[in-house]
Image (spheres, rainbow, N blue to C red):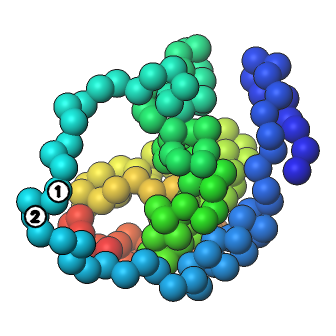
């Protein structure tokens, strides 16, 4: 594990490679989960304390593009919150294991890969095809996922007289939740 220089020149530890990370999470997911069951009567429960903002030590260390630090709490065993990659800093965290079991970790990587492919296209071609795909998704009330947009861009750019585009449009679900 080396160090990389961030935007502001601060050295931060480089995360493990994606395959190493997934292997660690898979190993943690194979372990037997803790038993869920009655842990005593309800009278034993302690009421939650009132919300208090995180202290500077508890805050996520991610710095936004405008220079502000993220205001959320970091995950246990990590320096970042779940939005900014804290799950990747702690592969054995229960939330990370749950995301792995639900298939969300693979979905995150697929979205990132699709985004890289989309923005590697020449800008003129990308904008026309991307706006056509987004317009079609918006008309059907669907989420704009990079994976879906990339499929639409590839169908739009296919040189088959529009057959691939019509097939892509016909195979889209018509409402949210029908995916």
Mark 1 surroundings within 10 Å by alpha-carbon count, few (fewer than 14), some (14 through 19), many (20 or more): few
Quarter of the image that includes the C terminus:
bottom left
Tally of marks: 2
Q: Position of residue 175 (x, y in %)?
A: 21, 67
- Taking the image as shown, residue 147 lies to the left or right of residue 166, namely right
Q: Position of residue 65 (x, y in %)?
A: 59, 21
- Taking the image as shown, residue 58 lies to the left or right of residue 89, namely left
Mark 2 surroundings within 10 Å by alpha-carbon count, few (fewer than 14), some (14 through 19), many (20 or more): few
Residue 122's label in the rendered image is none
- Taking the image as shown, residue 147 lies to the left or right of residue 54, namely right
Residue 45's label in the rendered image is 1
- Taking the image as shown, residue 28 lies to the left or right of residue 128, namely right
What residue is shown at x 21% (from left), y 36% (from top)? 49
What residue is shown at x 76% (from left), y 69% (from top)? 19
Mark 2, residue position: 42
Q: Position of residue 11 (x, y in %)?
A: 82, 28
């Amino acid at each position: 594990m080396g160090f990389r220089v961030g935007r502001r020149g601060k050295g931060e530890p480089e995360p493990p490679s994606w395959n190493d990370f997934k292997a660690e999470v898979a190993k943690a997911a194979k372990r037997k989960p803790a038993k869920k069951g009655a842990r005593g009567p309800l009278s034993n429960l302690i009421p939650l304390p009132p919300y208090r903002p995180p202290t500077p030590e508890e805050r996520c260390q991610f710095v936004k593009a405008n220079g502000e630090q993220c205001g959320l709490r970091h995950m246990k065993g990590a320096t970042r919150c779940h939005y900014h990659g804290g799950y990747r800093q702690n592969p054995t965290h229960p939330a990370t294991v749950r995301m792995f079991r639900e298939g969300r970790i693979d979905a995150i990587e697929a979205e990132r890969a699709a985004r890289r492919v989309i923005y590697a296209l020449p800008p003129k071609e990308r904008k026309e095809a991307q706006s056509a795909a987004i317009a079609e998704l918006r008309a059907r009330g669907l989420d704009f996922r990079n994976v879906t947009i990339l499929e639409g861009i590839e169908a739009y750019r296919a040189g088959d007289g529009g057959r691939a585009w019509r097939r892509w449009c016909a195979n889209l679900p018509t409402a949210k939740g029908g995916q």
